[in-house]
Amino acid sequence: MSDWATYTLQDLLLFSPRVYFRLIERYNQDFWPLQIVLIAVALAVLVPAAVRADRLRLAVPPILALAWVLCAWQFLWMRYAGINWAMPYAAAAFWIQAALLVLVGPMAGDPAPAGSLRHYGGIGLSMFGLLAYPFIAWLAGRSPVSAETFGMMPDPTVATTFGAMLLLGQRRLWLLMPIPVAWSLYSGLTLWAMREPAALGPLGVLAAFLVVVIAGRR
């Protein structure tokens, strides 16, 4: 037991930061410009939904589910699993989350009241996931080719999903929370182990989401 106490997060890494970010770069190059298309589609649905377009609200869960399936299939299963043995299990969890979004999403409940903390928090997290997340790579001093975008990479997809969950309502929200929360912790700790400033992305998004959920219930 004393030997285990000497281990750090860095000792548990299965790959180097260079290998990980090179993986993302090649992945982005393979699919360019699909990243722009996915962001545009999400904006076209989420922005009207945020301003009370009820019919478009029904399209949000399927769009999010498609993004989770794409992340699971093309990134976690086809690529990330090559350097991380845990990713097939993560891909399975992402497919479960996609199914939950399709089944539970339409029953989310009443949308967040305009001007409420939940409403503004939902807009903020959604826009952060869609528009700000790609710039984290640049802020962290990496190549823009390694940018993470909605529908292609898990972290911005989770951030956008958190925002949409707040906007669409909190009924049965607990069914949709465990997998995104678990992924945010895993991804944040992995990036922290790599000594990457980008670790503040998933961990900060998770903290903001939980604060809004808790404060919004009072």
Image (cartoon, rainbow, N blue to C red):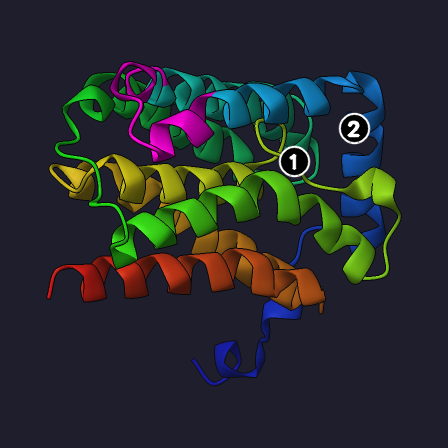
Q: Which residue is mark 2?
A: 28
Residue 199 placement: quadrant:
bottom right
For label 1, the SS is loop
- Residue at the right extreme, as displayed: 143
Q: Position of residue 180 (x, y in %)?
A: 38, 43
What secondary structure is found at the residue carrying circle 2? Answer: helix
Type of the residue with mark 1: Thr
Is 199 situated above or below 26? below
Q: Is residue 159 left or right of residue 83?
A: left
Q: Are marks 2 and 1 in contact (CB under 8 Å)?
A: yes
Report which residue position mark 1 lands on. Answer: 149
Magenta stretch, residue numbers = 45-59
Q: Nearer the viewer, residue 100 or 54?
A: 54
For label 1, the crowd category at 10 Å Cα-Cα, with few meaning under 14, some 14 to 19 and many 20 or more, is many
- At 71% from the left edge and 24% from the top edge, which residue is drawn? 36
Cα separation, mark 2 vs mark 1, equals 9 Å
Residue 9: where, in percent of width, then height?
59, 69
90 left or right, relative to 151 = left
Is residue 72 visible in this depiction of the protein? no
Hey, what amino acid is under mark 2? Asn
